[in-house]
Image (cartoon, grey):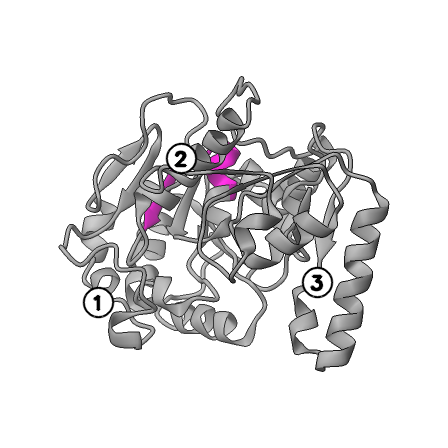
Amino acid sequence: MLVNKGTEAVLEKNPYIDEIITFDRSLKSYGALKRFAQELNFLKEIRKKGFDTTIDLTGGDRAAIISFFSGAKLRIGIKSKGFAGKKYLYTNLFDIDGRKHIVLQNLEVLKKSGIKVKSRKVLLNVSEEEKKWAKNLISYKPIVHIHPTSRWLFKCWKDESMAEVIKWFIEEGFIVVLTSDSTEKEMKKIDSILSFLKPSTKLINLAGKLTLRQLIAVSSISDIFFGIDTAPMHIAAALGKPVFALFGPSGAFHWGPWDNETFQEPYLERNGIQRFGKNIVIQRNWNCIPCGQDGCGGSKISKCLFDIKPEEVIN
């Protein structure tokens, strides 16, 4: 499995994967000659492995190039836009239904490739040692895992609104575990949220302190996840936790939290409040949603998210 560096922790401990290969996206910051040399070395290492088949689920230009230079005789991909001649880098290209959830889109590629799909479950394994570590860190129940931040600020809710919901969880007797990435802008949002709250022994702030595997471990012992449209939301859903997620400009029919125990079709509406299994997406039903924009007019603020009131979420 080839993924971007920094995401590989999600695939660790998966018994169906023999090897995880990572591509370092920081190469983009290198000078042209150094970047070219590094990318060429990466392609050479891929080719040495002697793959028979590549399956590209991204539709990206880089994935097409890597697939071709791998030397694999069978190169499967999805029809997508890109540079001239891109389609000739594959041996098999398939049209897929872009209106479906991303899980179903990926499985459609496999089915059209002739691979029998036996399960629609998203697998995320956590070891007993990891669970024990998390239980030693957080020894009380019930636990709500709240992840209110994203590197994409237009996916974030109002800080004071998030604080209101955190306050309600505490009043209801929950242990609130707060997480975020350690980037400056995400930590600023955490600080802003905390500024609306009084200190409490029921609020455990782990923002910026966890590795991805540690975050997965914390999620695995939690009872509920509440947050926004971001990676920890998908982690919680894959671990079977009830997920309550706030969506703004993204489509839940594409990116809503997946439920492994429900075999109905997910998120059939274009927008609005929707349920899929034990998961709930809270979203406005405005005609402009989903717009896929980075905030209204490029402002990094999504009015459709800011319009959601804390009392609606609590109800």
Q: Which residue is mark 1?
A: 303
* Camera-side residue of 228 and 170: 228
Q: Residue at x 35, y 30 (%)?
A: 278
Q: Does 24 appear in magenta?
A: no
Amino acid type, mark 3: Asp
Mark nearer the viewer, 1 or 2: 1
Which residues lie in the magenta part?
A: 235-246
How far apart are the two marked residues, 3 and 2, measured between alpha carbons?
Answer: 33 Å
Q: Which residue is mark 3?
A: 24
- In what quadrant of the picture does the C terminus appear? top left
- Tag 2, which secondary structure? loop
Nearer-N-terminus badge (3/1): 3
- The mark found on residue 20 in the picture is none
Q: Residue at x 56, y 63 (%)?
A: 181
210 left or right of 43? left
Amino acid type, mark 2: Pro
298 left or right of 96? left
- In what quadrant of the picture does the N terminus appear? top right
- Tag 3, which secondary structure? loop
Quarter of the image for residue 25 reads bottom right
- Tag 1, which secondary structure? helix
Mark nearer the viewer, 3 or 1: 3
Q: Residue at x 43, y 71 (%)?
A: 189
